[in-house]
Amino acid sequence: MSSLLNRRPMRRTHRVYLWLAVAVLLLFASTGAQAIPAYARQTGNACADCHAGSYGPALTPFGMRFKLNGYTDTDSNGFKIPVAAQITGTRNVPAKGQSSNLLTEADIYLAGRVTDNIGGYVKIATDNNGNDKFSTKLSDVDLRFVAKDVNLGSKQATFGVSVNNNPGFQDAVSDLFASTQLGPPGVTGTLLNPSSPNTLADRVIGATVYGVYDSDWYGEVGTYTALPLSEQSNLGYAQSGDPGKLSDTGYFRFAYMKDLKKQFFSAGIVALTTKRQLPRTGPTEDLTDLGYDLTYQFIGNRKNIVQASFVDILELRHYGSLPPSPFPGITAQTHEAVHDKTLSLTYTFLQSYGFSVAHMMSTGTRDVVRYEPYGVPDTTSNQFTVFWTPFGKDDSLTPFANLKLSATWFRFNRFNGSSMNVFGAPPGVPGTSARDLDAFLILASVAF
């Protein structure tokens, strides 16, 4: 994806990169799509039935089926109000800089069943940007119409339509970047990565048609368009993050999913292609994301649960223009590629205690014009998290409210193509190492 940072003259500053690193850490401080108590009230099931750790975001096979069924499953015991809320407080201790204690997020979820065939998920988030200034925005949206238990010969199928604003968030397997909040951070990134500059996440609107055959075969196809700048502003988003004008956009997803009761695995492919103008009056560039993902879960008797996933997205770019070059006789390349990879592993004990580790890589074509100071946009990072979720299980004090306490260490091994002096400070000026961007986060989230 050609970001705003790539399209402007290549005199990047320490402040721009530092802002980007801080934005990434705030993204990872967000709890993302978690267990919604409104769904537990609607179905009569505990949060732990859909989420291995009773809070998410990773789904169990049961949770995947609930999502594919359009969030419409119910215990038939009367009408349930499809509303939930979440409050998150964060203690942020950066490797360099001032520590902070903030109420980082207060969210409202409109989530659940409308009719037998219509349901959805809408998140309205109020975020604290660290300056005691709260901003409210419309976050992820996934509205569904579904036809369940359709007979196709001797097999059954489910068909549905999803109207959503974040490609990948609506995915049934829920291991793509938009579902997990584990998109690799970096100075550039793929269209399917919410950590990328000028990301598509929550700034587009689209519709996809999906189907599941015999519980194992899952396919989805659709299209997206960017929201007008005025609408982005009305929904709480700064125009500086505009993904640009999109046209001829197509989304494709195919996966094989196998639920063996005590184990689950899936293998899938995903593609997203579009023509984009960024800025909207600028030349058109062609962008194509191609990727695959692998998922494995050991569920056993639900005392010891292991979830592992690998996601690999390659983006091919054909730029419509060349940025000014500060080097005589050297021009930027017109055809480049970006690669985002994430490997994650989570272990949960008694659906309450656990840890997760993730290794994330964002790499790209070498280009000394687009990627100063070293000509390499490569970033490598790791995330280590321990967590405790005391509620959300069948035998909890209450299965319909939830609490999660977690501690996360976010560590950069490489940023902007280097481990030392990542911003390219001139001689005599103290440089910043990749480790200086590390942070330790303590989070407490309450959902009800």
Image (cartoon, rainbow, N blue to C red):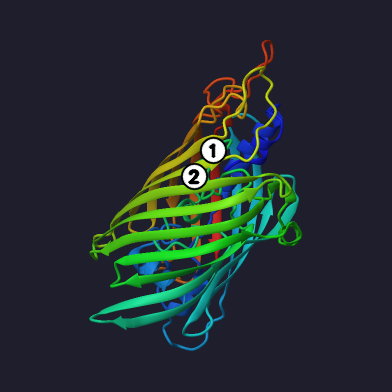
Q: CA distance from mark 2 to mark 1?
A: 7 Å
Residue 327 in the image, given as x and y percentages of width and height: 66, 18
Kindly check if marks 2 and 1 are in contact, taking CB atoms under 8 A apart as contact: yes
Instruction: Where is residue 282? Give x, y as percent.
Output: 71, 45
Q: Residue at x 49, y 43 (%)?
A: 315
Residue 448 visible somewhere in the drawing: no
Up/down of 161 relative to 358, above or below = below
Label tally: 2
Amino acid identity at mark 2 = Ala
Within 10 Å of disc 1 (Cα), the crowding (few <14, some 14-19, many 20+) is: many
What's the residue at 48%, 48% (across, down)?
289
Q: Which mark is residue 440?
A: 1
Q: Is residue 244 left or right of residue 115?
A: right
Left-right relation of 2 to 156 = right
At label 1, the amino acid type is Phe
Drawn side of residue 374 relative to residue 237, left or right: left
Q: Quadrant of residue 188?
A: top right
Mark 2 highlights which residue? Answer: 407
Q: Nearer the viewer, residue 105 or 60?
A: 60
- Closer to the chain start, of discs 2 and 1, is 2
Give neighbour class at mark 2: few <14, some 14-19, many 20+ (Cα, 10 Å).
Answer: some
- Towards the viewer: 183 or 207: 207
Give the image location of residue 359, x and y in percent: 42, 39
Residue 198 visible in the picture: yes
Q: Describe the element under mark 2 as helix, strand or loop.
A: strand
